Image (cartoon, rainbow, N blue to C red):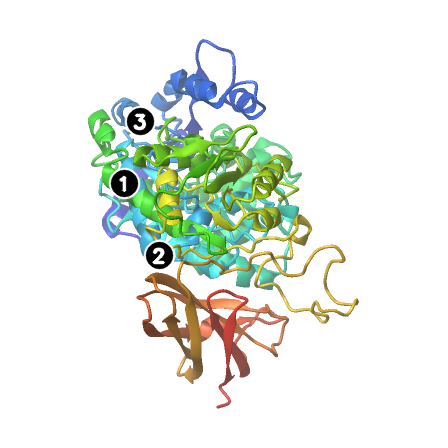
Amino acid sequence: MKHPEIEKRIKELMSEMTLEEKVGQLHQAGGSLVGAFDLTLEEILTMVADGRMTEEEGHNMLSEARRDWHEDDLRAGRIGSYIGVLSAEEMNRLQHIAVEETRLGIPLINGVDVIHGFRTITPIPLAESCAWDMELWQRTARMSAEEATAAGVHMTFSPMVDVSKDPRWGRIAESAGEDAMLNGLYGEAKVRGYQSDDLTRHDAMAACVKHFAAYGAAEGGRDYNRVDMSPQRFEEEYLPSYERAVKAGARAVMPAFNDLSGVPCSVNKKLLTDILRKRWGFDGMTISDANAIAECINHGIAADRRDAARQALNAGMNMDMTSGCFLDHVKELVEAGEVSMDTLDEAVSNILRLKFELGLFDDPYRSNAEEEKAAMLKPEYRALAREAAQKSMVLLKNSGLLPLKEGVRIGLAGAMASNGDEMCGTWAGAVQPGDCKSIRDGMDEERIGYAMITEEPLPDCDVFVCAIGERKAESGEAASRASLELTEADIALLKRLKESGKPVVTVVFAGRPLCLGPAVEYADAVLMAWHPGTEAGPAILDLLFGRVNPSAKLTASFPAATGQCPTLYYDHIRTGRPAGKFKYTSKYLDAPVEPLFPFGFGLSYTSYRYSEISATQTGNGIHAEITVQNTGDRAGDEIVQCYFRDPAAQRVRPVRKLAAFEKVTLQPGEIKRVAFDIPETALGYYDQDMNFVIDDGLIEIHIGGNVRDTLLADVDYRNA
Ligand code: NOJ
């Protein structure tokens, strides 16, 4: 929200700025690598990825390399922002140049990808979403902000709220899964946590909501690919999560790499101006994705860099992340009348507004080396990372083996058992080798005896703990997969352990849903650990030994076969021939219709009974209730889910849609009545002519512990 005092200061400052200085504010620069080697950052990363260099060698090279921050450009007022300055000292040095050596002394803003932690790493977003816990999401975001700001960060390129229905897409790891409402709530909590209620606080950082819009719908799950969908689907399933995060007060928005029905988001006026500014009233800053403005040439929509700059600025883009198109061409575009001075001024004022809001003009040096050192990996941060990991791991199978008894003799197997550095997952830029604890580290720390299983023969033990799955580089950006099956090596290991006749617990690490059929077949228990972060090992042991009762539930369906994608997701649309035994129905000949594990699924060490569902119409929506009883002998947290379905609508609607949820704690034997109020707008959708409508008549309410196991109540909406 605009503040009159800030608006006055923006105006005064802009009246003194030259055209060149205005253009300089639009440019975000990155640091180029310089050092005793002739390798670019991309080459080093490629060498690590293809095995020519170990990760540690790559890490050392990058941390030793000096970065050229283009200081002459900075002095000349040609840089308004940096991406990726990772230390307070370096940031202060650059900030001094901006504040003391440029003509107008406008401070820099430093943006960094702080996605699921800065130095203390919490579970990847997809994992953390499985906690269905806004309070937790906000607390972990606050921790990220405290560490990151101590290292000189002013803005994070997070939250990502791209609804992700296709697990082949590597960036599903960064999302809150396949449901629109969950992504929105996740985004809202993160924005609150990062920004706090006062952006001028030294430990507050601006949130940048991304990737606007519908990046998660990339065709075939292939990264950077096209997105083409009906306006109704876009409004109902993809847009709401961005709206929620923006309306929670996020001060920046990043358009997506992809095109949306033929118009790249970077030059998409409908998105950047009509929806974002005019409809939602957003008055923060837009910033492109890396090099995305220049890539409009590759999209085949811009003739050259000048043309790309013109289209982007006129569409509503404010800051150019690293492509340099704005820096090189906006001056001549304004002089030629192809971009109006008003458009340029609007972009500059949005950028300056954020700098004022953060308090950077009055207080540009927000941390120092000492504060930075003291802020990292505090014991309470490790404790929170452990709690978040406990609440994010989903128990998928347990035929009575878990929890393990203390003193049990463990055989520890699998490629993921002892590599702590693999635990942090995608986007953990400030993490240092050795920060994160593997299962083995956790066992060493607790002095739990185990034998490592490497080769034959298998040692004498009571139970095998087998750690398999994806390495961190196998999910995230540019890590889409055509196959979601487990590797042959993982399957062979599981088989070998099974054949020993001893019970097997499989712990799966991954940044996405995988086809876990073989794990389910060969193991007695399966724990989906995702990439759990700094305290991976200890949190896994807490769950395996039953010191903590698992409570997480899936926010993305798990496929039985890769070919089920992309129709796997829970809220798919109804067809005229729903899958059935009859041949001519909607299904595959060679794969099941249902996912292996449905949306909302997750086991616990206790059990719950659902009964007495009721649903009634209220003045402006539906009130529903259900009784949930803990029928086991352990306390537990149950995530109760409320779905609805509109059986006779004016347009084809999803088979089920999540409307509300509640996480309840139940002691053994305890019974609670859980209530939901579904606002009328949640029942609405867009008709053929894009009118938002809410139907009269029958609405089915389904409540249960996952989307497949629910009780039903009917409401005759507005006809009662
Ligand atoms: C590309 C990614 O798409 C985006 O999410 C990220 O914030 C930028 N690069 C900056 O690293």
- Label placed on residue 381: 1
Q: Quadrant of residue 151?
A: top left
Distance from the alpha carbon under mark 1 to that under mark 3: 19 Å
Q: For mark 1, give the secondary structure.
A: helix
Residue 512, compared with residue 601, is above or below; it is above
Residue 87: mark: 3
Q: Is residue 96 left or right of residue 479?
A: left
Q: Residue at x 36, y 51 (%)?
A: 546
Horizontal side of residue 485 vs 404, given as left or right: right
Which residue is the extreme one toward the right? Answer: 583
User: In this orientation, which residue lies closer to the viewer: 152 or 21?
Assistant: 152
Height in image: 341 above or below 631?
A: above
Q: Amino acid at mark 1?
A: Tyr
> For the residues marked 2 and 3, what is the alpha-carbon distance in whole angstroms?
30 Å
Please give left or right for residue 514 compared with residue 335 in the image. right
Q: Label 2: which residue?
A: 134
Residue 13 place in picture, x, y as percent? 29, 38
Residue at the extreme front: 460
Task: Give 640 or 129, whichever is nearer the viewer.
Answer: 640
